[in-house]
Every structure is written in C-alpha cells, then in structure tokens.
Image (cartoon, helix red, strand yellow):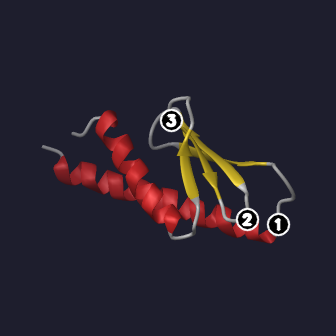
Amino acid sequence: METTSNIIPEFEKLLRLKLQLNNCKLRKKRQENNYEITTPAKDIFLMYWGEFPEIKLIYQAVGIRTQQTAVYEQAIRSHIKSCVSSIQDIMILTAP
C-alpha cells in the first residue's frame, strides 16, 4: 500500500488542479500538513489535518463573510472530498 509520503504530494497536486478551476490558489504553510487557500474574492481558508484523510477546512475571517464566500467554501469542500476519494481509489487499486 502507498505510504503517506507518496499520498500527500499526489493529493496536493490533484487539489491544486481542481482549485485552479475556481481561480483559487493553494499555498503550503511552513507547518506540516497546513495549507492556505485564497479565493479570487480574497477570502482565505485554512486547510489542515492531523491524520490524513481527516481534513479540516476553516474560514479565516479577514473581512465580511458574504454569500460568495459560502459558494467558494462549498466548492473547496467538494474539491477536497473528490481528491480524497480519488486518492483512496488509487490506494485500493495499487494494494497488493
């Protein structure tokens, strides 16, 4: 079975591609397993996990939370879920 060191870069690559569809940017923070997602509306979401794939997404209050913020949050959560599912499918297919 794939190790976490192989899974995380693949997850990050998939998520980065999906976020680009919404013109969002993914930036890895200095702390391990911590990322910052910025939307075109300048909303910031923090994504992190202790045990992959239990990923947490938190809105970083930098301004007024709008309806557009909620739309981006829903899209980001959907992208994360899709990427985790894809990684889990790959793990099942490559298992001995």
At label 3, counting other C-alpha atoms closer than 10 Å, the crowd grade (few under 14, some 14-19, many 20 or more) is some
Q: Quadrant of residue 29?
A: top right
Label 2 or label 3, whichever lies nearer to me, is: 2
Could you tell me how far apart the alpha carbons at marks 3 and 1 are, in whole angstroms? 27 Å
Answer above or below: position of 8 versus 42: above
Which dot marks residue 78? none
Helix, strand or loop at mark 1: loop
Which dot marks residue 33? 3
Which of pointers 2 and 3 lies earlier in the amino acid sequence?
3
Q: Amino acid at mark 1?
A: Thr
Q: Amino acid at mark 3?
A: Asn
Q: Where residue 80 appears, x then y in whole percent?
A: 50, 56
Residue highlighted by disc 1: 66
Q: Marks 3 and 2: in contact by CB < 8 Å? A: no
Which of pointers 2 and 1 lies earlier in the amino acid sequence?
2
Q: Where residue 92 appears, x then y in whole percent?
A: 24, 51
Helix, strand or loop at mark 2: loop
Could you tell me how far apart the alpha carbons at marks 2 and 1 are, in whole angstroms? 10 Å
Q: Marks 1 and 3: in contact by CB < 8 Å? A: no
Residue highlighted by disc 2: 41
Q: Residue furthest top?
A: 31
Which of pointers 3 and 1 lies earlier in the amino acid sequence?
3
The mark total stands at 3
Could you tell me which quadrant the N terminus lies in? Answer: top left
Q: Marks 1 and 2: in contact by CB < 8 Å? A: yes
Q: Amino acid at mark 2?
A: Ala
Q: Where residue 84 appears, x then y in whole percent?
A: 42, 53
Q: Residue furthest right?
A: 64
At label 1, counting other C-alpha atoms closer than 10 Å, the crowd grade (few under 14, some 14-19, many 20 or more) is few
